[in-house]
Image (tube, rainbow, N blue to C red):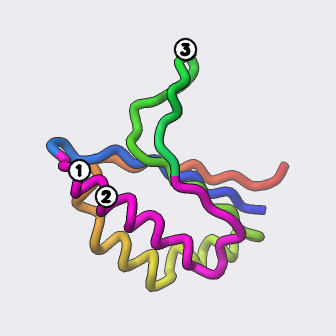
Amino acid sequence: MFVHHVFFWMAPGASDADRQKLAAGIQSLAAIEQIRTSHLGMPADTHREVIDRSYDFSWLAIFDSPEDEELYQKHPIHLKFVDECWQLWQKVVVYDAIDR
C-alpha cells in the first residue's frame, strides 16, 4: 500500500470562487484509475495542542503500490490539475507513507 496525503494552503486573498475552483480541481483527481480510494477534506473543528488546522484542504489518495502512485503523478488529469490550479495555493506539503 502507498498513502499519499497532500495539504494545501490557499494563496493570500483567495476568494470563495478560488476555493471552489481548487476543491473541484483536487476532486477531479479521484478519476485517476490507479487510486484505490481517496478523500478531499478540510480541517475538522478539533482543538488539541498537537493538531495543525492551518491548512485549507487535504487530499488523501491510497494506491496499491509506489508504482501506481508514480503513474498518478504523470497522469494527464494530475498534470492538468497542477497546470490549472497551481496559482491558487501558496503552500503544499506532502506526506507519503508505505506499509511497515
Q: Magenta residues?
A: 14-40
Q: Residues within 10 Å of mark 2 (few under 14, many from 20)?
A: few
Labels 1 and 3: the sequence-earlier one: 1
- What type is the residue that disc 1 sits on? Asp
Q: Amino acid at mark 2?
A: Gln
* Residue 21 magenta: yes
Mark 2 touches mark 1? (CB < 8 Å): yes
> Which label is found at residue 20?
2
Residue occupying the point 47% across, 66% down = 27
Pointer 1 residue:
16
Is residue 31 or residue 82 the one in the foreground? 31
Assign the N terminus to one quadrant of the image. bottom right
Query: Circle 1 sits in a helix, a strand or a loop, which is it?
Result: helix
Alpha carbon distance from label 2 to label 3? 29 Å
Q: Is residue 5 above or below residue 30?
A: above
- Residue 53 location, x and y as percent? 45, 30
Relative depth, front residue between 84 and 71: 84
